[in-house]
Image (cartoon, rainbow, N blue to C red):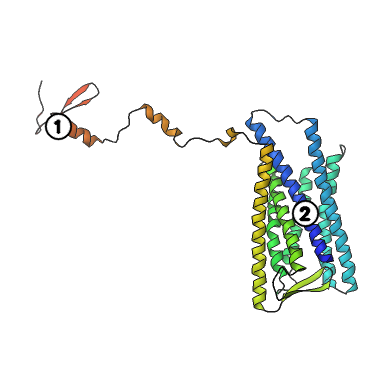
Amino acid sequence: MAGLFTYLLGGAGIFLIGASESIFSSSETLKDISSLNSLQPPTPNSKSKSKSKSITSLIFFSISLISFLFILNSLISIISALKSNDQTGVVLQLQVISISILFFLFSILGLFTNLSNSIKIPSQLLNTLCLFAFIEEFIMFYLRKKDLDGIENRYYDLLLVPITVCIVCTLLELKGSSFKPGYSRLGRGVGLVLQGMWIVQMGFSFYSNLITDGCFIKEKSRGNFTIRCKGHPEFHRARAIATLQFNCHLALLVCFVVGMYGLVSKKYGVSSESLQYKPLGAEMQHLDQGRFTLDSDEDEDEVGDRNGGVKNEGNVAVETTVNGYGSHH
């Protein structure tokens, strides 16, 4: 139960951080869009600035708290691995500690920058620390395959998807001028939400019967375990169930994003002029002022022949020839 509690606490914390990041960045982005639609420059007052500052400080504080808890949990797991003479478990937890230290340093520096007027650390440096932490996390889960027959490897492979989203969005935020930072922070927040949801799912799957019948957990120490199955049918069934669970989490994430966007846009709605909608027949309205016909020139020639070989073109009468001879005046 201790392992399940660890996964639940860590996943829930990452989910809340990602949700706060997504909601805050989307509200700021919609504020900018609404100010552009109203053709008025944004005029931030002291109240809005203090509110934004407090929310950002709360996000940094949450990151530092979750990172500290990860470090503490890894230290406890290292002590358990040393008692069990498990060198692999020690190495795995050292990797987790190194990643957690990067996130902890990122959050502490961001918190000092946001609260202090004397300490100003460039955002490029903070984003670089965050990028290195996500890349190291990606490498750890990509190479964490102690047992090739372990079902946990499938869960680790699927966890690479939200980590990749966070890496890409952090890279876009580093560009700054070429990409709006609000959208990159929004994407990173959504990636953190999916990552937190999947860590919670991993906890339930590893420490309960939500994988499949015939699979069991085998622990060498507190932080070093594997999920084995009795045979190939159970193994393939467990991998299929993991993929199905991930697809369900993606569907829940879509519902979360749509609901969040509806709530935020209701408060900071975008005016209808921003849609730049034009009716489908607007470009054809100028044709109503002229004369438009589907008659071809051949039809006009036939009409002219029936009228005695004379057809009118404006105010000029043109006489056609008959058998090669024209009339002479």
**Residue at mark 1 to residue at mark 2: CA–CA distance:** 86 Å
Tell me the amino acid under the disc marked 2. Ile
Residue 67: mark in rendering: none
The mark nearer the N terminus, 1 or 2, is: 2
Residue topped by disc 1: 306
Residue topped by disc 2: 14
Q: Secondary structure at mark 1?
A: helix
* Mark 2 neighbour density, 10 Å: few (under 14) some (14–19) many (20 or more): many
Q: Residue at x 63, y 32 (%)?
A: 37
Q: Is the Cβ of the residue at disc 1 closer than 8 Å to that at disc 2? A: no
The image shows a total of numbered marks equal to: 2
Please provide percent x and percent y for residue 282: 45, 33
Relative to 19, say whether 298 is above or below.
Answer: above
Q: Secondary structure at mark 2?
A: helix
Tell me the amino acid under the disc marked 1. Arg
Q: Is residue 309 left or right of residue 157?
A: left
* Closer to us: 245 or 130: 245
Q: Quadrant of the C terminus?
A: top left
Please provide percent x and percent y for residue 26: 69, 42
Relative to 231, say whether 254 is above or below.
Answer: above
Relative to 197, say whether 21 is above or below.
Answer: above
Please provide percent x and percent y for residue 16: 77, 51
Residue 179 visible here: no
